[in-house]
Image: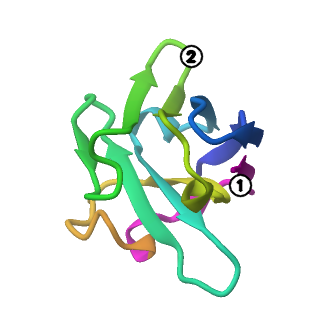
Amino acid sequence: QVQLVESGGGLVQAGASLRLSCAASGPTSRRAAIGWFRQVPGKEREFVARITFSGSTYLSDLAKGRFTISRDSAENTVSLEIDNLTPEDTAVYYCAAGLPPYSTSVDLPGAYMYWGPGTQVTVSS
């Protein structure tokens, strides 16, 4: 099993940067592929980025250019840095873990078995 806890959300002004963190724990957590999703009320959960246990990354089109995903294997954390925030980035951000055999549908919530409670990011204009 994998336990996940997100942190780093908050209220920021447009144009600022933010670094979200996902702390993973559990006996199989270091083998997990970690994905970041975001969700606004009334909409489906939206894929942002993913990183494997070996550090390979995959960014969604919305994330390319402003989002960076990275992994600290020693601390067993995955970070998502967002630059030049806009009000459209306002959402609850979730990290999720997928274990082997890894799904090829990495941008779908169903590819991940474990989820954190989420962290709210609010961007004011």
**Residue at label 2?**
75
Please tell me whether mark 2 or mark 1 is closer to you in this view. 1
Q: Tell which residue pokes out farthest to the top in this image.
A: 74
Snapshot colouring: rainbow
User: Relative to 13, is 26 on the left or the right?
Assistant: left
Q: Is residue 61 above or below residue 68?
A: below
User: Relative to 60, is 96 on the left or the right?
Assistant: right
Could you tell me how far apart the alpha carbons at marks 2 and 1 are, in whole angstroms?
19 Å
Q: Is residue 24 above or below residue 41?
A: above
Q: Residue at x 56, y 55 (%)?
A: 89
Q: Which residues are magenta?
A: 110-125
Q: Earlier in the sequence, mark 2 or mark 1?
A: 2
Magenta span contains residue 119? yes
- Nearest the viewer among 80 and 122 is 122
* Image quadrant where residue 32 sits: top left
Would you call the spot at circle 2 few (<14 residues within 10 Å), some (14-19), or many (20 or more)?
few
**Residue at label 1?**
118
Would you call the spot at circle 1 few (<14 residues within 10 Å), some (14-19), or many (20 or more)?
many
Magenta span contains residue 84? no
Secondary-structure class at tag 2: loop
Q: Tell which residue pokes out farthest to the bottom in this image.
A: 42
Residue 14: image location, x then y, percent: 62, 42
Residue 36: image location, x then y, percent: 48, 52
